Amino acid sequence: MGNAKRYKILVADDDNISVILITNYLKSIDADFIIARNGEEVLELYSQNIDIDLILMDIKMPKLNGLEATKQIKAKNPDVKIIAETAFAMVDDERKAFEAGCDAYISKPINGEKLSGMVKSMLGI
């Protein structure tokens, strides 16, 4: 039978290839994907869709970086799940992501199985 809920996942990434890969990796999840290309758009789309279940947040985005966007979203809703993603994994990136309020961290290139498992675990499916 499975879960009848349809999820809302916000994918925040300014790289089109990453967006395509992420949505393909997660196609087994019954979800609507909302795409944001920069940090300001993330905040705008989140305020219009407060029922978002999960956010995949690229750390390095134009206008407002993912860490700052995460802090602002978590201040409004500490329960929304946020997975940080970054292409240029530095030693401090993971620590900074958790300090900003992210619930998990994945580095690029993204492993599809790992991402799918992480998202399903956070959504409880």
Image (tube, grey):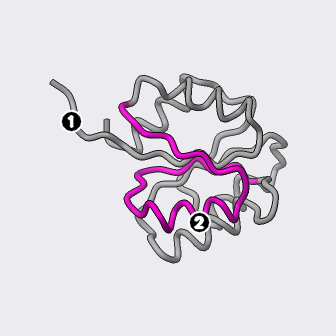
Mark found first going from the N terminus, 2 or 1: 1
Give the residue pinned by disc 2: 44
Q: Quadrant of the N terminus?
A: top left
What segment carries the magenta color?
30-59
Q: Quadrant of the C terminus?
A: top left
> Compared with residue 58, is residue 15 higher up or lower down, i.e. above or below?
above
Badge 1: residue crowd in 10 Å (few <14, some 14–19, many ≥20): few
Residue at 56 percent across and 30 percent down: it is 23
Where does the image place residue 48, in percent across and percent down from the top left? 47, 64
Q: Quadrant of residue 79?
A: bottom left
What residue occupies the far left of the structure in this picture? 1
Residue 35 among magenta residues: yes
Give the residue pinned by disc 1: 4
> Compared with residue 84, is residue 114 higher up or lower down, i.e. above or below?
above
Q: Secondary structure at mark 1?
A: loop
Residue 112's disc number: none
Badge 2: residue crowd in 10 Å (few <14, some 14–19, many ≥20): few
What's under tag 1, amino acid-wise? Ala
Residue at 36 percent across and 43 percent down: it is 7
Residue 13 among magenta residues: no
What's under tag 2, amino acid-wise? Glu
Where does the image place residue 121, in percent across and percent down from the top left? 40, 39
Residue at 67 percent across and 58 percent down: it is 97
